[in-house]
Image (cartoon, rainbow, N blue to C red):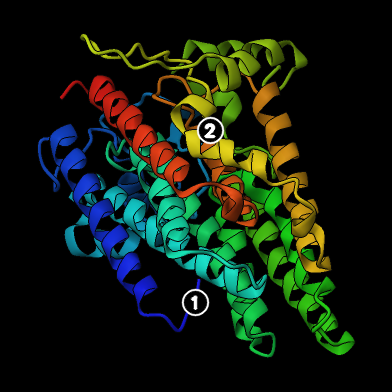
């Protein structure tokens, strides 16, 4: 991509326009409006508790909350309240979680599109305008981001906002790599990284990428020491906050409330058995993450959704382009090799977690837990996409959009 060429800017705005129309339409149909409440806007209640100097929430619904010593708590990380706060300050506890979930989802599309630009610039990749559009459109229309952004509900809202922080981390990280003397950008990337894992602990594995700037050939030794100090000191503060938050609620710095969940029979069984992670789940999870393909049909209901999830390759087909990655030209430069090794290591650890976890994200369309690692998987496709025929890219984007549109329609029963 020639960044001096104005055509990429046109593509950028066209992609965002398409995303806004698709997201807005689906959100309106799903919720019968854009300014409604989902019925379980738990982040609103958590903010209300904080302003009332409490940590327990007062909610009409108790489903999937953690009951401890007669009080109800959220077991999800607290960082997403920072995203919700501006909306809360305007409308209070009745602020629309449908609206701020939609805003977060569209913001994710914007951030991802900017990350692609910064990534291609840093690695000096030749990325055509068509490939750029196909990659961003696939993330926008055929990734978990679409399904999760249009339905609200605490599980979806929380994950969309967590990935917003994750994408903020990646954006500022690459922005810093392109401007290595601006340490404020690196500091911002560290802040967003910590906000991400303080939302979803599984995202802590992305901390491996903080090593990458230290290995950059343009980074002078004295600068590396400053980067290490920024990373360690800032992250330590977040870890201390996280431990204190848990201790104040449950008397245990490592307890986020998972043992006290009152909701899904599946999680209650895991709590009693003490087996949230186990190799006994690998066969089942592997089946739903990779083998349970979703097929479209010309007759109603057009597809059959598996509540445990359908294969990521059938609902997010653009991921298949990662098969084009193993080319010699990809590994000619050290920065590319290092980044890919770190990225693949993160994805490997992520998949170990997903395959050994007690649940796949029930009830859902697609694979919502996979969204934690989808941005990085989509990102590394950039290294091999130039070898993919444009017509194949277009077909995968269109097919992925149709699959996700049908799936969302069936799941929410428009």
Percent of width and height locating residue 219? 81, 83
* Residue 56 visible here: no
Percent of width and height locating residue 156? 39, 37
**Taking 203 as reference, is 241 above or below it?**
below
Say which element carries label 1.
loop
Residue that badge 2 annotates: 369
Q: Residue at x 34, y 31 (%)?
A: 404
Bin the neighbour count of mark 2 within 10 Å (Cα to Cα): few under 14, some 14-19, many 20 and up. many
**Taking 84 as reference, is 226 above or below it?**
below
Percent of width and height locating residue 127? 54, 64
Bin the neighbour count of mark 1 within 10 Å (Cα to Cα): few under 14, some 14-19, many 20 and up. some
Q: Residue at x 46, y 38 (%)?
A: 74
Q: Quadrant of residue 212?
A: bottom right
Residue that badge 1 annotates: 2
Label 1 vs 2, first from the N-terminus: 1
**What's the distance in space between the residues labelled 1 and 2, CA to CA?**
35 Å
Question: In terms of depth relative to the viewer, which is nearer, 44 or 395?
Answer: 395
> Comparing marks 1 and 2, which lies closer to the viewer?
1
């Amino acid at each position: 991509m020639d960044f001096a060429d104005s055509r990429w800017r046109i593509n950028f705005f066209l992609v965002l326009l398409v995303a806004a129309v698709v997201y807005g339409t689906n959100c309106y149909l799903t919720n019968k409006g854009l300014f409604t409440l989902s019925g379980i806007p738990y982040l609103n209640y958590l903010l209300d508790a904080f302003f009332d100097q409490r940590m327990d929430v007062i909610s009409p619904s108790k489903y999937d909350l953690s009951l401890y010593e007669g009080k109800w708590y959220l077991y999800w990380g607290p960082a997403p309240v920072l995203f919700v706060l501006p909306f809360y300050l305007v409308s209070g506890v009745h602020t629309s979680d449908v609206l701020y979930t939609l805003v977060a989802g569209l913001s994710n599309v914007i951030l991802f599109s900017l990350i692609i630009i910064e990534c291609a610039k840093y690695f000096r990749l030749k990325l055509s305008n068509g490939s750029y559009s196909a990659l961003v459109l696939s993330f926008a229309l055929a990734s978990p981001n679409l399904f999760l952004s249009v339905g609200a509900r605490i599980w979806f809202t929380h994950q969309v906002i967590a990935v917003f922080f994750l994408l903020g981390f990646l954006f500022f990280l690459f922005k810093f790599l392109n401007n290595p003397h601006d340490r404020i950008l690196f500091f911002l990337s560290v802040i967003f990284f910590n906000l991400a894992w303080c939302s979803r602990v599984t995202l802590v594995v992305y901390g491996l990428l903080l090593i990458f700037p230290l290995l950059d050939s343009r980074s002078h030794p004295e600068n590396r020491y400053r980067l290490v100090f920024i990373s360690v000191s800032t992250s330590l503060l977040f870890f201390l906050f996280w431990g204190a938050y848990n201790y104040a609620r449950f008397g245990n710095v490592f307890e986020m409330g998972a043992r006290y969940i009152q909701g899904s029979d599946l999680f209650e069984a895991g709590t009693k058995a003490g087996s949230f992670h186990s190799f006994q789940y690998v066969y089942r999870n592997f089946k739903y993450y990779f083998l349970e393909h979703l097929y479209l049909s010309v007759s109603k209901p057009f597809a059959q959704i598996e509540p445990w999830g359908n294969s990521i390759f059938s609902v997010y087909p653009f991921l298949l382009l990662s098969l084009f990655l193993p080319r010699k030209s990809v590994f000619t430069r050290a920065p590319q090799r290092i980044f890919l090794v770190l990225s693949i290591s993160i994805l490997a650890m992520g998949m170990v977690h997903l395959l050994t976890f007690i649940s796949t994200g029930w009830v859902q369309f697609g694979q919502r837990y996979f969204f934690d690692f989808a941005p990085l998987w989509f990102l590394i496709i950039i290294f091999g996409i130039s070898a993919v025929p444009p017509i194949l890219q277009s077909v995968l984007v269109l097919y992925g959009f149709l699959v996700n549109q049908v799936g969302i329609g069936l799941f929410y029963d428009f």
